[in-house]
Image (cartoon, rainbow, N blue to C red):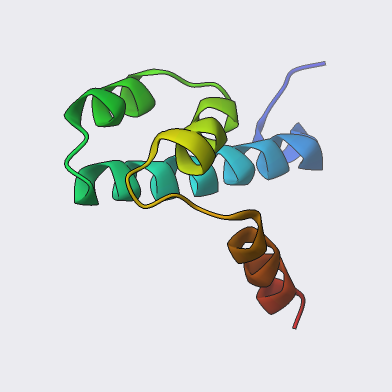
């Protein structure tokens, strides 16, 4: 079986979008907060969103709250 774009399972697309969403948000917050070390680490390491979420919830200058995340998901469901 030769893998091709048409044969990629849906879960790979979901994982890609999940990681892209968190990476983009984390990079944006790191750049806006002038956190150069975190920006470089987040840009160069691919952790499928884990490091990005930890950064956003714990180390970002303007921390993300769980309530904000829940509000975003509620908006997406509409």
Q: Is residue 78 left or right of residue 72?
A: right
> Which quarter of the picture shows residue 61?
top left
Q: Residue 48: horizontal and vertical position, in percent?
A: 59, 28
**Quadrant assignment for the C terminus:** bottom right
Question: Residue drawn at (22%, 35%), measured in percent from left and top?
Answer: 35
Q: Residue 4: horizontal and vertical position, in percent?
A: 67, 29
Q: Residue 66: horizontal and vertical position, in percent?
A: 65, 55
Q: Residue 73: horizontal and vertical position, in percent?
A: 70, 66
Q: How many marks?
A: 0
**Quadrant assignment for the N terminus:** top right
Question: Up-down: is 68 above or below 41?
Answer: below
Question: Residue drawn at (29%, 41%), measured in percent from left and top?
Answer: 30
2 and 68: which is toward the camera: 68
Q: Residue furthest bottom?
A: 78
Q: Is residue 37 left or right of residue 78?
A: left
56 and 10: which is toward the camera: 56
Question: Up-down: is 51 above or below 6?
Answer: above
Question: Residue drawn at (66%, 71%), measured in percent from left and top?
Answer: 71
Question: Residue drawn at (44%, 49%), measured in percent from left and top?
Answer: 63
26 and 61: which is toward the camera: 61
């Amino acid at each position: 079986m030769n893998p091709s774009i048409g044969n990629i399972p849906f879960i790979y697309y979901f994982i890609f979008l999940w990681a892209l969403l968190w990476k983009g948000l984390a990079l944006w917050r790191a750049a806006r907060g002038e956190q150069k070390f975190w920006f470089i680490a987040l840009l160069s390491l691919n952790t499928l969103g884990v490091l990005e979420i930890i950064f956003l919830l714990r180390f970002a200058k303007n921390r993300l709250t769980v309530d904000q995340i829940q509000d975003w998901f509620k908006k997406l469901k509409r």
